[in-house]
Image: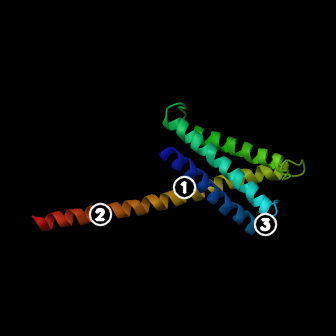
């Protein structure tokens, strides 16, 4: 049951993150996909596939099936994500692969992918910082309560 929860958590997280960044691309005027219900479902599927890629790489690494350094894992994720986006573009006829758009698609991907990673890194850093502050506070309260009981 825990494996299913973890699996679903990765998918939901990637759908949420992907949706957020898609809305940001719309706000900046960088999208070529019109926001229709059909496209929304297709994007959800694409983001879920990226989540599956991420959990697959994570699980392979954690079970020692794939011993590669962290940067190697990021590179595999980078290439895999590119292939998922290019593949869904082809399957759903989004015209990312049209000859006139290929160069701008690649440049956009090379810009957006690091921006997403930096945003996620910043989010994880803030989360870790909040947890550390909470742990320090809890530890200080624990020590002060032990001093009063003596």
Tell me residue 62's x, y (percent). 49, 37
Circle 2 Cα neighbour tier, 10 Å, few/some/many (<14 / 14–19 / ≥20): few
Q: Is residue 101 visible?
A: yes
The residue under label 1 is: 121
Circle 3 Cα neighbour tier, 10 Å, few/some/many (<14 / 14–19 / ≥20): few
Q: Is residue 24 left or right of residue 126?
A: right
From the image, state whether disc 2 or disc 1 is nearer to you: 2
Q: Which one is in front, 138 or 59?
A: 59
Q: Identify the disc placed on residue 87.
A: none
Quarter the C terminus occupies: bottom left
Tell me residue 92's x, y (percent). 82, 50
The disc, 3 or 2, on the residue closer to the chain's N-terminal end is: 3
Above or below, comparing residue 68 to residue 146 in the picture? above
The disc, 1 or 3, on the residue closer to the chain's N-terminal end is: 3
The disc, 2 or 1, on the residue closer to the chain's N-terminal end is: 1
Give the color scheme: rainbow, by chain, secondary structure or one colour. rainbow
Q: For the point 86% across and 52% down, which residue is it?
A: 95
Q: Identify the disc placed on residue 29.
A: 3
The Cα–Cα distance between marks 1 and 3, rounded to whole angstroms, is 25 Å
Tag 3 near tag 2, CB within 8 Å:
no
Q: Identify the disc placed on residue 138.
A: 2
What secondary structure is found at the residue carrying circle 2? Answer: helix
């Amino acid at each position: 049951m825990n494996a299913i929860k973890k699996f679903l958590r990765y998918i939901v997280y990637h759908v949420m993150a992907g949706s957020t960044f898609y809305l940001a691309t719309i706000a900046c005027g960088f999208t070529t996909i019109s926001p229709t219900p059909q496209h929304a479902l297709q994007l959800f599927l694409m983001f879920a596939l990226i989540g599956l890629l991420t959990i697959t790489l994570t699980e392979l690494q954690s079970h020692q099936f794939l011993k590669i350094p962290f940067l190697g894992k990021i590179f595999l994720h980078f290439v895999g994500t590119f292939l998922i986006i290019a593949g869904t573009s082809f399957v759903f006829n989004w015209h990312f692969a049209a000859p006139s758009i290929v160069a701008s698609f690649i440049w956009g991907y090379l810009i957006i992918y690091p921006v997403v990673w930096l945003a996620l890194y910043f989010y994880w850093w803030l989360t870790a910082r909040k947890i550390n502050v909470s742990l320090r506070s809890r530890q200080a309260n624990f020590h002060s309560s032990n001093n009063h009981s003596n």
